[in-house]
Image (cartoon, grey):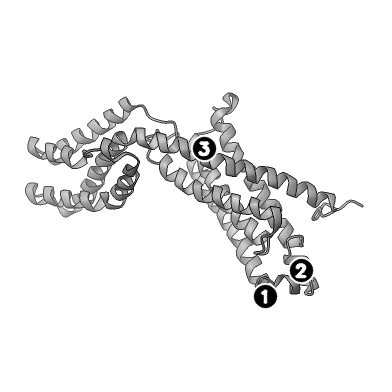
Amino acid sequence: MKIFHNILLTLLTLGVGVIVVTTLIDGWTYYQLPQAERVLQEEAHKMFGAAGFAGHGLGILAGIFFLGLFLYVFRKHLKFMRRWGKLNIWLRYHIFMGISAPILATVHSAFKFQGVISIGYYSMMAVALSGFIGRYLYGHIPRRKSGEELSLRQVHLDRAETIRRLEFEFGLKGPDIQKLVAFSTPRSIERWGILNLFRILWDDLSRWFQARRLARYFQHKYGLPPSEVNYLTRAIAKQRMLVQRIAFLDIVHKVFHWWHVIHKPFAYTVLVILVLHVAVTVSFGSTWIFKND
């Protein structure tokens, strides 16, 4: 099933990309015109304007994708949906729609944001940008392959297994095991408070290079072949990552909570304005290809 979802998401991404790029290329001249001059380009306006064939179609697709974001929320919180596939798969579609919706909405608007709808648009952009932050924080909460959160006991077991594997496969001795443990142990977490978020970011950026340096040290000391260095680097980096995520788990949970507090109001603002926008659009008879005879 993983391969199926990989293929489907790839096709969906390519599809959205082709639609957006094609529309931008065909309508580039129109999009460069000032607002007052666009209506004078009758054919182009009927195609690329917000109420035009292409523009309106992109708006409908953006709305569908935005509403689709709530499917992930339902999957997380509704009991009858908890057996409907793995949570991490739902998250991947959630991210795809969260990125695609504002891109499609931007082209739908023909790059003109006015009135109340501009509030909805910028709220959608805020949802998308905060979504990237949320995904980053989500990745720092240890989870099973299914996407369910791991217990601290399971994380500690995984860490111990990694250390035993390194000791067995590479013959690491006691002092070097201690060196490995010291390498991955965070220092003075409590006194840093919320600033630990910057330490998490720095650790993510520097972890591989530091693990590589330690792997090189073990290579020279134990005469390991060069082919083993990459594997050892990944194993050391994973061990450090597990320990860091244990250490920073409470902080990440707190920030993740406040992230939800900020993220949700923007999402609900977009939802309300989207419903109003659709209602007003339909009331004026703009129904795209669904014309009433």
Mark 3 lies on a secondary structure that is helix
Q: Residue under circle 2? A: 45
State how far apart marks 3 and 2 are (Cα).
40 Å
Q: Residue under circle 1? A: 29
Residue drawn at 76 percent across, 61 percent down: 53
Q: Residue under circle 3? A: 261
Q: Tell me: residue 83, above or below residue 274.
A: above
Tell which circle, 1 or 3, labels the residue nearer the N-terminal end: 1
Residue drawn at 63 percent across, 59 percent down: 106
From the top left corner, tell me how far across and down residue 153 is, in percent. 31, 25
Mark 1 lies on a secondary structure that is helix
Mark 3 closeness class: few <14, some 14–19, many ≥20 residues within 10 Å: few
Give the quadrant of residue 79: top right
Indicate which label's residue lies in the foreground, 1 or 3: 3
In the image, is 221 to the left or to the right of 289?
left
Q: Tell me: residue 39, above or below residue 178.
A: below
Tell which circle, 2 or 1, labels the residue nearer the N-terminal end: 1
From the top left corner, tell me how far across and down residue 175 is, in percent. 8, 37
Mark 2 lies on a secondary structure that is helix
The amino acid type of the residue labelled 3 equals Val
Q: Tell me: residue 201, above or below residue 259.
A: below
Give the quadrant of residue 264: top right
Residue drawn at 41 percent across, 42 percent down: 137
Give the quadrant of residue 268: top right
From the top left corner, tell me how far across and down residue 201 is, in percent. 33, 48
In the image, is 185 to the left or to the right of 117?
left
Q: Nearer the viewer, residue 124 or 65?
A: 124
The amino acid type of the residue labelled 2 equals His
